[in-house]
Image: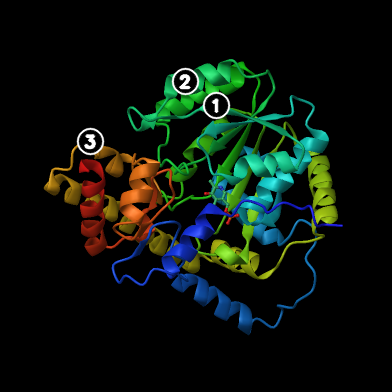
Amino acid sequence: IFSEVPEAPADAILGISVAYKNDKNPRALNLGDGKPLVLEVVREAERCLLDDPKQDKEYLGQAGVPAFCRGSAKLAFGEDSPVLKEGRNATVQGLSGTGSLRVGAEFLAGFYPGVKQVLIPNPSWANHKAIFEAAGLQTAQYRYYKPATRGLDYEGLLEDLGAAPRGAVVLLHACAHNPTGVDPTREQWAGILDAVRDRGLLPFFDSAYQGFASGDLDGDAASIRMFAEAGLELLLAQSFAKNMGLYGERAGALTVVSADADTSARVESQLKRVIRAMYSNPPRHGAEIVAAILSDPELYARWKAELKGMADRIISMREHLHAALRERGTPGTWDHIQDQIGMFSYTGLTRRQVADCLTAKHHVYMTLDGRISMAGLSPESCKYLAAAIDDAVRN
Ligand code: PMP
């Protein structure tokens, strides 16, 4: 019956990890993806959960851990958010960022009365297109990155949003755009907000790096809050994979912001129905950890400090790599290495330079689009990487 099933294309990132593991060279570097560390505060929260006699393994409701949902919404929208005060949010637990996006996509497929097309930045995290299309929505791209400046194609972006079908959905990376590390400035976000409002687009924020980008949880949520405070209805998918290091625990949340509390209650009832048919209810452990950290002032303060440490380390690796390239006098401008935001840097290296030189000759493993994960670097390996980049650019 299944003999004609074609082989699915391999996952690019997983392929890189496998190739790296098979490379016996001691200098080999894996810059494909993050570097999961278990945060101290997560270990502490887990110890508290183990000791808590009230913890059991009972099923959660479809919407997940209530304290997790409340805490996630507060983290994204802010303590004094009018959206939360007015009860205009329906927040449910999802299977990390991916599952939250998918529940949102299913909800839109069933209930969004507008144009069922999702505009995704070019480029974007590779899974966005697959997630929305799996839910039966169409996708299209809007201009985002300008290779010539290695920055934002702001004019192109505004033009594309302005020409989008009225009422389409637009996916926005809340901060630390993956894969480019290029984020709009505050003024540019205000311009994007105007374009979204003028065209009646429905914003769908993907927030996978809150606090991880700058070390400032509020600053990294500024785009979401700007749109929410302007009174727009929107969707938001949050992930705790990176900022709490909970990757495999699959802790995330989906929020739908509606016009009033009454609508919100009905939206929530439908989100639960979507979840019920997909996986009935989400896993407990990761969400209990997040809820414990978000609701205990002492754990929360410790989390913020550890998060700041991770973000600062990444910023410092950017400085090291930038300095090492300057020291070598590597041809080209490299300021984007320092200017870009978040875990990833889009180096501007071509596929050929990556494949033939960095990987084949220097044992540096990274995606062919030239993206490196700053989390995989140390001050020492920055020098090695700079030498490899220098070789690729000159030869
Ligand atoms: N969105 C973006 C932009 C991402 O980079 C990621 C993780 N790489 C995700 C969503 C989802 O990750 P997860 O499902 O592990 O939370």
Mark 2 Cβ inside 8 Å of ligand 1: no
For disc 1, the marked residue is 142
The answer to whether one can see residue 311 in this image is no
Task: Tell me which residue sits at (20%, 53%) in the image.
Answer: 387
How far apart are the two marked residues, 3 and 1, measured between alpha carbons?
A: 26 Å
The answer to whether one can see residue 352 in this image is yes
Relative to 89, 159 lies left or right: left
Relative to 22, 279 lies left or right: right
Task: Tell me which residue sits at (71%, 62%) in the image.
Answer: 65
SS at circle 3: loop
Relative to 5, 249 lies left or right: left
Q: For this rendering, which residue is in front, 395 or 93?
A: 395
How far apart are the two marked residues, 3 and 2, measured between alpha carbons?
A: 23 Å
Relative to 251, 324 lies left or right: left
Mark 3 Cβ inside 8 Å of ligand 1: no
| Location of the N terminus (image quadrant) | bottom right
The answer to whether 243 is drawn above or below residue 220 in the figure is: below
Point out the tag, 3 or 2, that comes first from the N-terminus: 2
Q: For this rendering, which residue is in front, 286 or 48?
A: 286
| Count of numbered tags | 3
Query: In x, y percent, where is residue 229?
Result: 57, 32
Q: Quadrant of residue 137?
A: top right
Mark 1 Cβ inside 8 Å of ligand 1: no
Q: Amino acid at mark 2?
A: Gly
Q: Are marks 2 and 1 in contact (CB under 8 Å)?
A: yes
Point out the tag, 3 or 1, that comes first from the N-terminus: 1
For disc 3, the marked residue is 333
Query: In x, y percent, where is residue 395?
Result: 22, 43
Q: Which labelled disc corresponds to residue 156?
A: 2
Task: Tell me which residue sits at (49%, 65%) in the image.
Answer: 18
Are there few (<14), some (14-19), or many (20+) residues within 10 Å of tag 1? Answer: many
